[in-house]
Amino acid sequence: MDTNAEKIASRNKPELKQAILDNLYYLRGKSTTLATMHDWYIAVAYTVRNMMMKNWVKLLERLYNKDLKIVGYLSAEFLMGPHLGNAMINLGIFDDIKNAVEELDLDFNQILQQEEEPGLGNGGLGRLAACYLDSLTTLKVPAIGYGIRYEFGIFDQQIRDGWQIEVTDKWLQRGNPWEIARPEICYNIKLGGYTENYYDAEGKYKVNWVPYYEVKGIAYDTPVPGYKNAAANLLRLWKSEAVESFDFYEFNKGDYYEAVDEKIFSETISKILYPNDEPEKGKRLRLAQQYFFVSCSLQDVLRLQRLRGLNIDGLSSSFNLQMNDTHPSIAVAELMRLLIDENNFDWDRAWNITQSCLSYTNHTLLPEALEKWTLSLFASLLPRHLEIIYEINNRFLNEVKIKANGDNQLVRRLSIIDEDGERYVRMAHLACIGSHAVNGVSALHTELLKRDVMHDFYELAPEKFLNVTNGVTPRRWIKLYNPKLAALLTANIGERWNTSLETELIKLEKFADNTGFREKWKQIKHQNKIDLAHIIKQRTNIEVDPNSLFDIQVKRLHEYKRQHLNVLHIIHLYNRIKNNPSTDVVQRTFIFGGKAAPGYFMAKLIIKLINSVAEVVNNDSDVAGKIKVVFFPDFNVKNSEYVYRAADLSEQISTAGKEASGTGNMKFSMNGALTIGTYDGANVEIFEAVGAENFFLFGLKAEEVYETTRNGYRPYEIYSTNQELKEVIDLIQSGVFSKGDTNLFKPIIDSLLGQDPYLVLKDFQSYTGCQQKVSDAYNDKDHWTKMSILNVARMGKFSSDRSIREYCEKIWHVKPLE
Ligand code: NBG
C-alpha cells in the first residue's frame, strides 16, 4: 500500500492541497479558520519535507554500504538560508506547491516569508559550507555536514539613530520543521579535569583522562536535497545537554542547585554562535564548542565505521573529513585520542589514519583571524589533547630539525606552540601538520598562503598545498533568487545550466548582440530593481529611483573590505555637486548592507558614518535626483534574495591580498551586475573570466600593497597633496555629517590619516577615477547591457559544482554514487 508521502509525491494537485490541509489539522491542530500564516507555512513545509523522505531514508540506508566513501564536512558554521523555497526548487515541485498554495487562497510569497532565517553562520564561510552541501548532493556524493545546532544564530541587526543594535536571533522559537531530533544518536563529551598514566597488563603506556565534567551531544538531522536527482544528504548538527537532567547523587546530598547549575552550563555549549572579527582571547566557551562538535562528529564517524562492519584501520577509505577553517582543527588531536586511548591503537598507526582522513581549508590570511589558544586555557579544558599536541609537535619538530640544519628560527616558526611572549597553541599549524591536503580558496589566496602565512610548511611539503577556488550554487543564487532571469536563460539555452553551468552559460554569448534579447535582459533587471526599491521603502522609508544606477556593497563590515572607501567616493560626488550644481553625474543609488561584529568598534562606526551620510545626502535638495544612499538593515541570506539580482554595480573593493576569495562577488556577477573591484581574492579569476573590458579594475595589486607598506607608507602626505581627497576628509571632520559634532568620526579620520592600515587613501584616486569610467559606461545603456550579458555568460566556472568536483578529485578521492 502507498504511504501518504508517496501518494503526495505523485504530485497530483488536489492531493497536494489535501496534504497541506491534513498537516494543518493533524500537526498543527488547526482548521483553516483558526490557522495563522505561520501555521500554514508549517503545514506546507511538512508537505515538502514528506516528499523528500523517500530519498532521504534511502540515503540513510546507504550510509551502511561498505563500499561508499563518505565526505564528512566539519564546519562550525552552516548558513543554509531558508529551506522551503530551495527544497521546492531542488525537488522540482516549485510550481506544483505554489499552485496548490494559491488554490487554498493563500499568498505564496507570504508563506515563504514566514520562515525564519537559520542563521548558523557569520557570512561567506558558513554560506560556502551550505553551497557545498547543495553541490555534493546534486553531484550524488555521499556526505554528512557536521556542525553545531546553535540555539541562537547570528544576531538580527536593527538600526537605531544610525547605529547598529544587536537583537538575539530566536530562530527556534516557533519550531523548526526541517530537523529531526535523534536522541538515540548521542555521545558523551568530557571537559576539564586531569590525566593519569599507567601501564596496562601488556606493559603498554596508557593515559586515562579524568574529566571535571561531562556533557552530552544529541544529533539533529536536516535533509539536504539534491537538484532533481532523487538524492539527499545529511546535515547533522549537535545540541548539548546535561548528561543526566538531575544528578541524583548531588540531589540526594541535598545539593539540588549545584546539579541544576551543571545542567545549565551543559546547555550553554551550543547556545550561541560567536560573531567573528573579534579577539578570541579568553573565549573558553568557544574552544569548548569546537571540541564539543568535533568530538561528537568523530565518535559518530567511528560508530558508522563499525556499523558498516569495517575496521578502523581502513577509515580513510571510508571517510574524508574536511576541516572548514581551523574551527574544527582540534579534530587532529581528538582523532588521535579516540584511536589511542579508546581504541588501543599505537601512535604510528593512529597518526597514519588521522593524517589520511583529514584535510584542511584555510579561509583567511589576516593574522588576527588565525586562531590560537593559550596553553593555560587548553590545559584547563582539554588536558589530554594538550599532551597529544605536545607529542605531535615533538615528533614533527624532530623531523624538521634534521632538515633545518641548525636553523632554530625555522624550527620556532614551524612549531605548533607559539613561544613568543605568552605561549599559544597555533591551530593552523596543528591543522596543517595533521592533514594530507591543505587548500586555499582562490588562486591568489593559495599563492599568498604558500608565499607568506604557511611558507615554511609549503617548503617542507609542497605537494600538500592545493587550490580550490570557491563557488556558489546556481540553484539558490540564480534559479530561486532570480526567477525571471532563470526563465530567460532556460528559454534561450535550455535548462542544463542548472547543473552544468560551465559548459552551458557560455552559450549566452551569442545573444549579447541581439537587440531583442538585450531588451528582455534590461527589463528583467529593471523589474528586479523596482522590487528592491519597494522593499527598501518598506524597511527604511527611503524612496529610491529604479532608473538610477544601483551601486551595491553587501558583506560583513570590516575595515579590510573598505566600505569607508565607498563612502569617501559618495562624499566626493556629493561635494562635486554641491560645488557645482550643474555637474553632470549619472544618477546613482548607493546601497549598503552587512553586520558588524558587536565588539568591533570601527566597523560599527562605519555603519554610523554610512547612515549619517545617507541622512544628509538624501535630504539635500541640491543633490535630489542625483544621488541617494541606503543602509539596508539586517542583511542575511533571506534578505539577499532582493539584493544581488537588482544590482547594476557590485562593489568588491578590499585591499589587495586581504580577501581570501569572496563569494558575493560571484553572486552579483552571475546575476548580471558588473564589478568594480581590486585585484584580490577570486576577483582576479572573475576578471580573467569575464575579460578586462567587462570589469572595472582599480587599485594597488597585492605586490604593490606590500611594497607600499614596506617602504613606510605615509597617508597624511596623500591627504595633503590630493585636493579632492582633502575636501572629502575635511567635510567629515567639519561635522557636516554629524550635526556639528567634530568628534564622532574622529577615530575613522585618525586611522586614515595616521596608519591607514588598509590603504584607503592610497587607492582613493584610482577608485574615483574608475567610478567615473563606470558612470561613462552606464550612459551607454545598450553597451552596458551587453557587458552584463557577457558577465553572466562567462561566470560558469564559479558554480560550486565545479569546486566540489575539484575537491572530489584532488583531495577527497571520492566518486559520485552509481
Ligand atoms: C572567509 C573569507 C572570504 C571567503 C570565505 C569563504 C572567513 C574566515 N573567511 O573571502 O574572508 O570567501 O571565507 O571561503 O570567514
Image (spheres, rainbow, N blue to C red):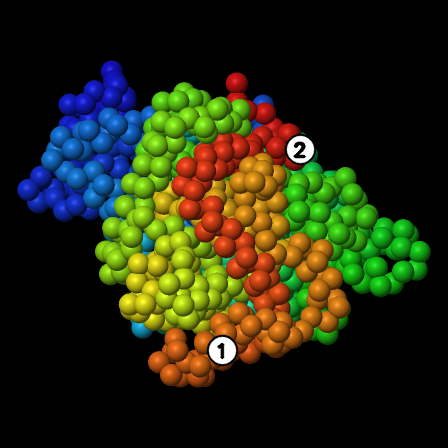
Q: Which mark is residue 429?
A: none
Q: Is residue 635 above or below residue 181?
A: below
* Residue 542, picture quadrant: bottom left
Is residue 363 visible to the viewer in this orientation of the structure?
no
**Mark 1 = which residue?**
730
**Amino acid at the residue labelled 1:** Asp
Residue drawn at the location 11% of the way across and 35% of the way down = 105
* Residue 59, picture quadrant: top left
Give percent across and percent down for residue 654.
Answer: 56, 57
Q: Residues within 10 Å of mark 1 (few under 14, many from 20)?
A: some
Q: Which mark is residue 810?
A: 2
Residue drawn at the location 35% of the way across and 32% of the way down = 519
Which of the two residues, 477 or 188, is positioned nearer the viewer here? Answer: 477
Image quarter (top left, top right, bottom left or bottom right) of the N terminus: top left
Residue that sits furthest to the front in the current view: 582
Which of the two residues, 111 or 522, is positioned nearer the viewer here? Answer: 522
